[in-house]
Structure formats: structure tokens, C-alpha cells
Image (tube, helix red, strand yellow):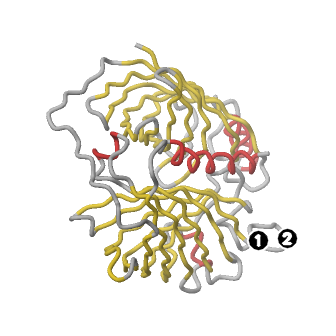
Amino acid sequence: MKLILLFICTLFSTILLSQEIEKEKKYSFIDFQYFYGSIIEHNPDIAHLITGHPEGFIVSYNNKTYGFNEWERYYNYPDWGFSLIYQNMKNEALGENVSIYGHYSFYFLKRRLQFRIGQGIAFTSNPFDIETNFKNNAYGTTLLSTTYVMFNYSQQNIFKRFGLQAGISLIHYSNANIKAPNTSTNTFAFNVGFSYDMYSEDFPEYIVKEEGKKFGEPIAFNAVIRSGFNESDVVGIGQFPFVVVSGYADKRVSRISSFQVGFDVFFSRFLKQEIEYQFISFPNSGLSGDEDWKRAGLFIGHELHFGRISAVTQLGYYVYYPYDFEGRTYFRAGLKRYFGKKYFGSITLKSHAAKAEAIEFGIGIRFR
């Protein structure tokens, strides 16, 4: 069930991309890129898994925009689409990964510099198994959450609709602590490839944004409830549900940007098991075994709007913190989808620095 929820999580972000583009003519292109790189040793616990130089390929289908939707004009007419990545990790314990993504590509420097970010789900061929593959402490499940970012120099339609591109990529795999172990991997790679334009020569003129058009909204208040499943870092301790209750105020200062301030209350059952385990296993740890497993925090945040979709980032600090787990600061990032003016759904990743704690599925209401 937890893996099905993870699958729904990443597919949800992919479906959101296609829902935003309605009743407009599509202009598409595909690209293929080969990459070769190295796994970054972000944690000494994965040093034994870095034995070669991973390689693979990225195939993408992309839809161009030209300002049909107003938000596209404020982001310099990005592309959106879907990607497939195959990666040979060049390590017997890690095996091979195949992943699918929804992505956005943004352009700079007269559309020569491309920045792409994709979120999706991966299948790994050789996950952790206590008996047959105990060395793989990076991937605790067969299905993983995955993110990739890419910086390319891109020149499209050089000769008979073919173009060239080259750059660097970072590919991340993790199960967000749905099940231990979850040390995760990050691959830094160089990529090179080609693109092929599928649209005809009648690509429309870009619709220019209206300059000087004022935009503003009064302060709004939001109530959110988030939930999911996660596990402690201790292998075999068990997976447990959690609930997060949040409230915050936001102020939209432009068509693309909002700022937030609010609070979270965390009810994380895995921490109750973590406290009991630490108390029994390490009697000299100073724990009484009765520490409260609930937490509360304050946060500030930012929301980047793409029509009905937005990207959320929040930085929080625990003000009620009876048990020390990964430090007092936390970070949340993810996607929101508005349904009308009041209701929204969200999928976010909560972490402590680079250490993921949980994928959160949320529903909320926004009111003035």
C-alpha cells in the first residue's frame, strides 16, 4: 500500500502538468541524451557502493508554449513534458534504474541556456534485502521517488529540424523514508544529445505579457492536513502513519510569487517506536523512554505560481522538541494544485537538511 501511495504521488505531479494546457494547439519536440558521471558521496555510509561511473540515457517528449496561458509569459515561455531515464549504476548491489518524470524546462540567454527540473518515480532492479542484498543500504524499496535537474546549452532546429544540446545533470533517487534503509544516491553527470522538432513551420508569435498591469491580493489564511507513512532509520522497526496539522497566512505579492508564515503540529508514530528502541538498546543514552513523540514548529515559506499549480518551499524550526531527531530545523518542498479559489491538494517532501523524513499528501482550504 505504501508503494502504491508513492506511485500515486509522483504520477500526480506528472498529470498536473498536462492539465494546465487546455484548448491550444500543441507544438512538440523530442530529445535524446547520453550521460556519463559519478555517484556523489553525500554520506560515508554509501562509500562501498561507489565502484564505477554510472551511465545511461534520457529520452524526453516536450511541448512548447507561446503564452496562450498567462503564466507562461512571466516565465519566458517554458516547455513542459515527460522524460524516461535509464541508468546503469555500475555497482552490483545497486543494479539498474528505470524512471519516468513530468518536467518543466526554462530558458535564458535568448533561449540558448536551458534549465530543466523533473519529478517522477523509479524502478530499481536490485533493492535492499537482508539476506540476498544487504550491501544496498541506499534503496530500501523497489519503487523510488526521483528528481533530476539539468543545465544545457541548447540549439534547436539547426538542420532539418534536428538540434544539438549538451550540459550537466544531477539525478536523485530516494524512497523518502517510506521504508528503511534509505541512504539514497545522487549522480552528477555530463550529458550530450540531439533534439528533433515535430511541429511545422507555422509556430506562432510569442504572446507578450502586459507591462504595468497591477496585481495584488489581500492576506489569506490556510488550513492544511497532511498524512502518509514512514519508518525510522532502523531497519525492521516498522512503518507507521503520521498526521501533520498546519495553519498559515499568505500574501500574494505578484502573479508568480507568494510569501507564507505559519505553524505545524506533527504526530509521527515512528518517533514513538524510535524512542522505545533507543531506550531499550542503549540504556546509557540518557533517555527515560517516556519522551513525547509529538513536535510543533513555526515556518516561513514561498510559493511560486504556474497557473493552478505552484511550487512550495518552507523552512521551519521546532519550538516544541522533546526528543532530538535530526536537528531542530526542517525543510519542506513540493507541489500544490488549486481546485477553484478555495481548495487545494499538495504533495510535499519533508526533510532535515539532506535527510528525508516523509512524503506528505495534503488537502487544504484557503480563505480570506
Relative height, residue 332 to residue 355 (above, below): above
**Where does residue 330 sit, x and y in percent of width and height?**
47, 41
Where, by quadrant of the figure, is residue 106 drawn? bottom left
- Pointer 1 residue: 134
Residue drawn at 81 percent across, 67 percent down? 130
Vertical arrangement, residue 351 with respect to residue 216, above or below: below
Disc 1 element: loop
Mark 2 highlights which residue?
131
In the rendering, at what x and y percent does residue 136 appear? 70, 71
Q: What residue type is labelled 2?
A: Glu
Please give left or right for residue 249 compared with residue 58 in the image. left
Q: Is residue 366 left or right of residue 144?
A: left
Query: Which residue sits at x=73%, y=60%?
Result: 141
Question: What is the spatial separation of the Cα atoms under label 1 and label 2, in whole angstroms?
Answer: 6 Å
Image mark count: 2
Residue 95 visible? The answer is yes
Report if the CB atoms under discs 1 and 2 are less than 8 Å apart.
yes
Which of these two is toward me, 150 or 202? 202
Q: What element carries label 2?
A: loop
